[in-house]
C-alpha cells in the first residue's frame, strides 16, 4: 500500500463517533439509516411524522422542527 492509499483510508476517531450517533438516532427514531443520513445532509425533508419523532426524542417541539425545515427550504430556494 502506498502513502496516498494510507491517507485515503485514514479517518479521525470522530468518524466512528458520528457513525455511532447516526446508528443510535436511526434506532431511537425507528427510521432507516439512509433516511437519517439524508436528513442530516438536507436531502430529505422533515415531515410531520419525523418532527413528532424528533419531539419525543429530544423534547423540542414538533412545531420547531417543521418551522426550521420550512425556513431552510425557503432560504435554499432563494439562494438558487
Image (tube, rainbow, N blue to C red):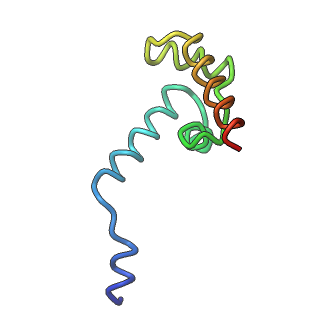
Left or right for 10, reference 28: left
> x and y percent of residue 30 in the render?
57, 28
Q: Please, is residue 34 above or below residue 45 in the view?
A: below
In the image: residue 4, left or right of residue 55: left
Q: Quadrant of the C terminus?
A: top right
Residue sitting farthest toward the bottom: 2
> Residue 25 in the image: x percent, y percent?
47, 32
Relative to 3, residue 77 above or below? above
Tell me where residue 65 sits by quadrant. Answer: top right
Identify whether 22 is placed above or below 55. below
Q: Residue at x 35, y 90 (%)?
A: 2
Residue nearer the viewer, 45 or 75: 75
* Quadrant housing residue 62: top right
What residue is drawn where x is 46% and y is 40%? 23
> Across the whole image, how many numbered discs are drawn on residues?
0
Task: Quadrant for residue 64, please give it.
Answer: top right
Considering every residue shown, the one lying at the far left of the view is: 13
Q: Residue at x 33, y 46 (%)?
A: 17
Screen quadrant of the N terminus? bottom left
Q: Nearer the viewer, residue 67 or 30?
A: 67
Residue 33 location in percent, x, y? Answer: 56, 42
> Going 62% across and 22% down the picture, which residue do you hit?
50
Amino acid at each position: 500500500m502506498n502513502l496516498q492509499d494510507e491517507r485515503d483510508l485514514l479517518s479521525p476517531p470522530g468518524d466512528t463517533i458520528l457513525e455511532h450517533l447516526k446508528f443510535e438516532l436511526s434506532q431511537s427514531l425507528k427510521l432507516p439509516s439512509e433516511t437519517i443520513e439524508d436528513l442530516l445532509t438536507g436531502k430529505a425533508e422533515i415531515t410531520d411524522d419525523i418532527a413528532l419523532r424528533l419531539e419525543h426524542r429530544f423534547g423540542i417541539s414538533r412545531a420547531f422542527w417543521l418551522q426550521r425545515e420550512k425556513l431552510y427550504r425557503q432560504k435554499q430556494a432563494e439562494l438558487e
